[in-house]
Amino acid sequence: MFRNYIKIAFRNLLKHKGYSIINITGLAIGMAACILLFIVVRYENSYDRFYPGHDQIARIITEDLDPDGMDYTPGIPYPLKEVVATALPDLPMGFYNDHSGSQISVLGNNGGAAQAKFIEDKGLGMVEPGFLRIFEQQWLAGSPDVLEAPNMSVLTKSIAEKYFGTWQQAMGQLISIDNRHTMKVTGIIQDPPVHSDIPLRVISSFETIRQRPDYHYDPHWGNLSSSMQLYVKLKTAADSVRVNKVLLKISKDQYEQNGRMERAHYLQALTTLHSDNRFGNFGDHTTSQATLWTLSLIGILIILMACINFVNLNTAKAVSRSKEVGVRKVMGGSRAQLFWQMMGETAVLVGIALVLALAIAWAAMPFLKQLVSIQEKLPLFTRDTIPFLAIVSLLVILLSGSYPALVLSGFRPALALKNKITSASIGGIPIRRALVVVQFAMAQVLVIATIVSISQMNFVRNMELGFNKNALLVLNGRTDSTALSRQAAFKAALLQLPGVKAVSFNSDVPSSDNNSASNFNFDHHANDEKFAIFLKYADADYFKTFDLRFLAGKAYDPGDTARTVVVNETFLEKFAIKDPQQVLGKEVRIGGGRWLPVSGVVKDFKTNSLRENIKPLIISIHRRRFTETAIKLQTANIVQTNTAIRKIWDQHYPEYAYDSFFVDESIANFYRQEEQLETLYKIFAGLAIFISCLGLYGLVSFMAVQKTKEVGIRKVLGASVGNIVYLFSREFTLLISLAFIIATPVAWWVMNQWLQDFTYRIRIGIGVFLLAITFSLIIAWITVGYKAIRAALANPVKSLRNE
């Protein structure tokens, strides 16, 4: 019997080729989209879950309370570890201090001149042995104990081969970090998986920086760096309650003043590092759970729309199969047999669609990886995807086939044989209308989401940042004493180039992901202020190079040490100072340093991405922090000027690798994930509209066949082509309009939540919704109109004769 069902199923598919192609195409595209989105979501949720006991690993993070709300950082003050270790001696822990972006020079066995130079933009850190006991590695040589002593390094297998040819030859060799620390290679680990927010490539002993206070080590409770992170391993996942209680007590002891706790430390689970945008990570991106839920929802919507197409077309087509059903029932066929026959046909069609969907997904995989920044090769078939495919296929068969099968198997044989079965008599018209409304409501939600995301990203791209970001080249420099001694000569040589307008040494550009902060005191107040001050360090030419505008005063004078400082508008707002002139001459003290007068106030510029508020800021001189050289270029001949700059770099810093970026590109990287989401929205909104129109085309095609006689009579009685097109399109226009009414509040709420991630954002106006409904109606009219015009232009004599 099963063989007979399959045979009949194929015969019906071939008999109704047009409807079969529409159904298979819709289901294949929907299933392919679902498969691809599942792969993305599964991959994003897999970060750092390969470590043994990953659900017991956490990092201690910092939450600062200021008058404007909360500030978050993954870093901690250095002394916190000792206090936690005393309170919880049984808690395994280890520091990780990130130094990504540093230069590694390969020195060989005997040291001396560098044999090769590499910039490691990720995965370079100073760690304690306890860190590598928490994050267990596969050791090819050595063990965590090799990092007990200073000036020791562990390399991954691929990095060791990159530096020395083979990992065996790397053992015992010497490397230099930023020409400041000569390190001995004492261990090799197998390459960890790529999907980690703590990438490991070159791991050096934390003891090295304990001996160097100028290397981001600070023993004060008031100062912290996001690069200095402390990781712990709990006895069980539930042990976090006990540890958090201890951290809360420590926070109260250290930071509570006048009944107000200004800073708190608590645990953040390793499994949330990749999804918590407040803290960030050392990987190349974060992906919020809201984003993953959104992608999952899009996948569900797409597959549901394809199922709706199937239900609509099969219920519409049910009338044409009424005689077949009547004959089968008269010949003794039961309703159950007819039901499973129809379900068998659905299963065959879904099976064909699944094969086609897998081919589409396989072809689209390289583009998907590039779009969502997946760095490793992902297999299409895994132990997760195979059960997923089975579940999706089964659900699609049930969702698509159950209702049409129930309708067909329920026909009364007497009515079926007499051709008395109509769409109205089986109740199919109201259901088809409802399904069309649901389908287009889903599609319009995606269309509105796409329009909002495009508008927000255009707003971000074109927003005034408060400084000039164009034609600004930044060189990543070094801050050892030898490099610092050559800065003046290097700068003078750069300014001799005709394509160079200005040069500045600084810690970071105006808009960056730097959040260097400190406690401070203003105007000799009794206590430090209740909010942290954010810091940028730059020479006197910084303001000219980036076209920063002064509201009062002036820049500080050139020099090697800070004698005055410059503040921004937000700094004044924190102290309710209306007139910028009033702050000039007043003094500030950063941390435990000396008092410095304010020489100028600059107009606010965006200190970070547009997701964040502008920070209260102090800009001052600190040569040891000048890790970047910003060069303002003439817009003409940028390529030639860049080549000349590289030659000058090689002349002045031959022992350093040339490493550069343009400011506008670095700012664009802030919004890379939003750009990727915008592209995904465009793609899937397009697929949603395509699937909807595919179903619409099928329904109109069926309607045209059913109304052949009616159209012929209307034409004979004088109806124009426009009248016939109106006949076909009127109902669908009303249905799409109803879908729009349903979709509007849903889309507004969803996208309004998405926009909350941006401090600076657009307002969702009525124009967005008008554009969405106009677009949907035009596409629908084109789809309906094509088939309606063909029906209207048909010869009425021929259609009436056939009838």
Image (tube, helix red, strand yellow):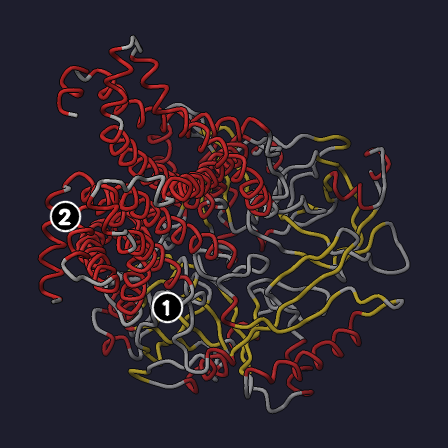
Residue 482: x and y in percent read 48, 56
User: Could you classify mark 1 by the number of other residues whose Cα lies within 10 Å: few (under 14), some (14-19), or many (20 or more)?
Assistant: many
From this view, report whether residue 589 is shown above or below residue 611.
below
Q: Quadrant of the N terminus?
A: bottom left
Q: Residue at position x 59%, y 83% from top?
A: 238
Residue 331: x and y in percent read 14, 58
Which label is found at residue 13? 2
Q: Nearer the viewer, residue 156 or 330?
A: 330
From this view, report whether residue 522 is shown above or below residue 135.
above
Is residue 47 visible to the viewer in this orientation of the structure?
A: yes
Q: Nearer the viewer, residue 557 or 774?
A: 774
Q: Earlier in the sequence, mark 2 or mark 1?
A: 2
Q: Are marks 2 and 1 in contact (CB under 8 Å)?
A: no
Residue 56: x and y in percent read 52, 81
Q: Give the secondary structure at mark 2.
A: helix
Q: How many marks?
A: 2
Q: Is residue 134 left or right of residue 561?
A: left
Res. 541 image quadrant: top right
Q: CA distance from mark 2 to mark 1?
A: 56 Å
From this view, report whether residue 20 is shown above or below residue 76.
above
Q: Residue at position x 23%, y 21% from top?
A: 791
Residue type at mark 1: give it: Arg
Q: Which residue is mark 1?
A: 201
Is residue 492 visible to the viewer in this orientation of the structure?
A: no
Residue type at mark 2: give it: Leu
Res. 223 image quadrant: bottom right
User: Could you classify mark 2 by the number of other residues whose Cα lies within 10 Å: few (under 14), some (14-19), or many (20 or more)?
Assistant: some
Q: Give the secondary structure at mark 1.
A: loop
